[in-house]
Amino acid sequence: MSKIVVDTSIIINGQLIILIESGKIKNSEIIIPQAVFDELQSQASQKKEQGFFGLEAIKKLKEISGNFELVISLSGSHPTSEDIRMAGSGRIDAIIKDVAKQNQAILYTSDNVQHLVAQAEGLESVFVKPIPKNIALEFLKFFDSETMSVHLKENMPPMAKKGKPGSFVLTKLNDEILTREYLQLITSQILETTTSDSSTIEISKTGAYVIQYNDYRIAITKPPFSEAFEITIVHPIVKLTLDDYAISEELMKRFSDRAEGIIISGPPGSGKSTLASGLANFYHNTGKIVKTFESPRDLQVDPGITQYTKLDGSFDNSADILLLVRPDYTIFDEVRRREDFRTFADLRLTGVGMVGVVHANSPLDAIQRFIGKIELGIIPNVIDTVVFVKYGTIGKIYDLELVVKVPTGMTESDLARPVIEIRNFADHVLEHEIYTFGEENVIVPVSKKVQKVGIEKLAEDKIRELFRKYDPRVEVEILSDNRAKILVDKQSMASIIGKGGSNISEIEKVLKIHIDVVEKTNSNRHESTNSSNEISFHFSESKSGLVLTVGREYSSMHADIYVHDNYVTSVRIGKKGEITIPKRSEASRTLMKLASSQNDIQIFLKD
């Protein structure tokens, strides 16, 4: 009768039972080292599935031993606490080999390292390669073409999210109450797939597993981590390219030419990772070297894109390897922990183009998450574009830039400091500013109603004066040092732009800035003539002019005069609180023509 010593690996993966049932092992004594038995018992005590699998396999081994003329025996001593502590260094494996030597037995193993070491020591060894089983996975029956994720919890019916990113419904699949035994069956099937190339264990902790099976991301939790046994399986139902999004020509140009610190933000299930996958494939198809950082690795990317996970439990270690392979772009899926933000910033500052995916309810929240993790002054060097995704579509986009200036709303020049400007990418309007105030870093919204002062006020007045001949009620908004927006009535736009844009081009050359010509809408038509700015007056006539008396408290202020919403003129109120309009002036003739009484005239304070 031949003697066989088996190790933990060949028991857990079920290959020992397969060899016996196929008749390849018979009329033998199978020796199980006491260290193997103790290791399986320890794993089962820690609620690890492989411990239960191994103990069940030994139980079945004893049940079928009589049918194949087998003798099952235990051999060797119990491992010490020191042996258990050094198990990761091969101490338990060494004990198993010693049992084989002492019994002059053949070692059967599915661990290739154990097999090679045994042969090097002159011990007869048989390596049994793990053969993945063709299992009809039970959880697949819960999926169809519209299922985004399946949620299985003991003592609850199976649930699923059906629809598309940002627009889904949580649906009960059937009325069957799930038992723990049923969920353990599904878990066993999933774990058995990890011996194949199509499945990997991404996270393995006491009470929790995360497994990537093909394009299914599977999270398994059980006590003591969760109060009950639960399996959540997420499956992407769409794979989009950038052509499937409504991306403006300017944004596409930003993605292609300039953006190298992109943050894709949005709430869970909004389609962030789908856009990140599309962006990764876009860069790959333009001839760039693209890598990903993921845990788990579930982005749907082209085969030419290498997907990295944590090295020794840290993306910081992965970054050391990444820099050696010199990628053009790296997609960092789920920037979440403090060290993730630092790793993202370090890689960006080394010159790697970075695309980060961040959970946030607004694009501003995504920027906020970087504050405190990295120095405030280098945030614009790390992030230049923030894209907010909701309901599977691209929403607001922010552009970041660092400038030295007096923060908006402050007037004293000695208050100048480094300020991060956050502008709406679509219209370049300044919406927020980040700067240090006292000892705190603050994000301050910039009101569109902030009173203009100094040079900016003079520039606005100059532009308004130039365009008043086309539209007397033109409204001007300074967007940046070299860009302004004017709002005019629809009938004035053609004359301002000119044939083929010739007129506006000439005006831009004179002003030396870019002008955005925008048609007034109902929402912005009376923005500058809000009723709260209207002041009352007394009308009278003198020999030489029309006199509108508003009161001494308005002396030296500026005002606009309208008749039936038609702009007439802008004036400076005199020291006595009077507005005098010469009778021979164009403004006087317009007033006399349009106004039939004092009630038709309106005065709006500008200051």
Image (cartoon, rainbow, N blue to C red):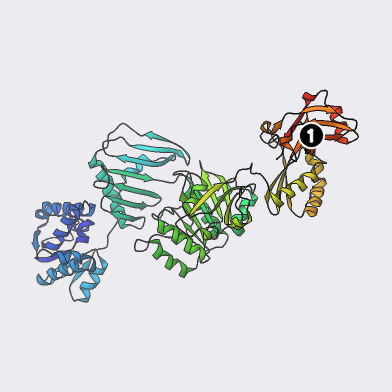
| Quarter of the figure with residue 150 | top left
- Relative to the observer, which residue lies in front, 206 or 487? 487
Crowdedness near tag 1: few (<14), some (14–19) or many (≥20) residues, C-alpha within 10 Å: many
Q: Position of residue 25 (x, y in %)?
A: 16, 61
Q: Which residue is mark 1?
A: 578
Q: Residue at x 55, y 58 (%)?
A: 380
Q: Quadrant of the C terminus?
A: top right
Task: Tell me: 470 left or right of 328.
Answer: right
Taking the image as drawn, is residue 33 in sight? no
Residue 140 x/y as whole percent: 35, 43
Which quadrant does the N terminus fall into?
A: bottom left
Q: Is residue 136 left or right of residue 347?
A: left
* Residue closest to the eye, 385 or 422: 422
The three-letter code of the residue at mark 1 reads: Glu
The residue nearer to you, when weighing 230 against 351, is 351
- In this image, 374 relative to 404: left or right? left
Q: Left of 472 or right of it: where is 232?
A: left
User: Along the line of sight, which residue is nearer the eye, 593 or 99?
Assistant: 593
Q: Residue at x 49, y 50 (%)?
A: 366
